Amino acid sequence: MTSRIALIGGGPRLGPVVAPELQQLVAPADELVSYPSRISAFPYTALEMLLQEVGHAEAAFTAVDEGARAIVIDSVGDYGLGAMRASLSAPAFGSGEAGLAAAGAKGRRFAIVTVWPASMNFILEGRLRTYGHRDACTGILNVGAEDDVAGADGPNAYLSRIKGGHQRVIDAASHAIGIAASQGAEAVMLGCTCMSGIAATLAAAAPIPVINPLAAAVAAAAAAGPILRPSVGEDRRDMLRAMVEAVAGAPAEACPVCISEPQA
């Protein structure tokens, strides 16, 4: 009998997610299934982040209703994590929270290397403050540039260029990891769960440990047991779903910097 671990916000829902770097972390009976947010807004600003808090929470309700035994937020932004923990009958894990805890384990100093441009560092900075790791972080190194996202060809063109040239992204991220080490970082956390597929390649060439935040959260979810069911009224669940239904048909906004997609 299979057991389901839900990846919330992890792209189109195409059934079980095939990701070798994640599958090795779960039991043979566990399957990873993607449950995307039905709110299409990409979190360029705090406003879209607020929308995604709602979208991710609603997706998590659906996952638990369909039998998921644990929830993993497939984003370092950990959208909706507090709401999930307050209302779901399954344990919830944020990739940002798990990744930062692993990067800063035993008091070590760490850096973050991300494919996002600097304009989106507010998400990472917010997680650092929320989880109490700000002083341990030596800095955020951005592989992506502002022109890549806001250029005349638009973010989708940037996405296509990255997908067509992964080696350039790997080389740039590897270079940034080297800089982080030279600046005193004792570890690096990858700043986007979309980097999960290249995490092992980056780690193999790195002079310091490289933390895959999505893998850290999946490992925690795989080891988690059941929790006591919170008391959440059906009216609140219905209200949440009604809010999402109002915008669920809007065109999807592709992540302009993601370098991999969930596979099915």
Image: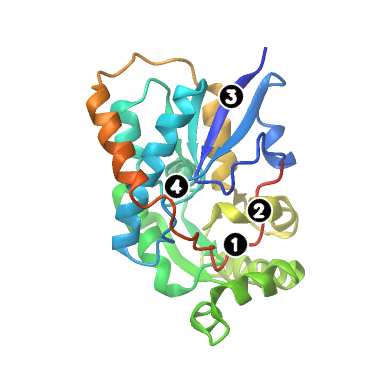
Secondary structure beneath disc 4?
A: loop
State the residue position of label 4: 38
State the residue position of label 3: 4
Whether pointer 4 and pointer 3 mark residues with C-beta atoms closer than 8 Å, the reply is no
Residue nearer the viewer, 175 or 81: 81
- CA–CA distance in space, label 1 to label 2: 8 Å
| 83 sits to left or right of 141 | left
The amino acid at mark 3 is Arg
Q: Looking at the picture, how far across and down is residue 219, in whole percent?
A: 58, 32
State the residue position of label 2: 261
- CA–CA distance in space, label 3 to label 1: 25 Å
**Among numbered discs 1 and 4, the one appearing first in the sequence:** 4
From what the image shows, is residue 151 above or below residue 231?
A: below
x 56%, y 51%: residue: 193
Q: Quadrant of residue 20?
A: top right
Which class describes the residues within 10 Å of circle 2: few (<14), some (14-19), or many (20+)? some
**Among numbered discs 2 and 3, the one appearing first in the sequence:** 3
Whether pointer 2 and pointer 4 mark residues with C-beta atoms closer than 8 Å, the reply is no
From what the image shows, is residue 175 above or below residue 196?
A: below
**Among numbered discs 3 and 1, the one appearing first in the sequence:** 3
Q: Looking at the picture, how far across and down is residue 91, in whole percent?
A: 42, 25
The amino acid at mark 2 is Glu
- CA–CA distance in space, label 1 to label 4: 18 Å
Secondary structure beneath disc 3?
A: strand
The amino acid at mark 4 is Arg
Residue nearer the viewer, 104 or 164: 164
x 30%, y 54%: residue: 50
Whether pointer 1 and pointer 2 mark residues with C-beta atoms closer than 8 Å, the reply is yes
State the residue position of label 1: 258
Q: Looking at the picture, how far across and down is residue 77, in whole percent?
A: 41, 52
Considering the image in quadrants, where does the C terminus appear? top right
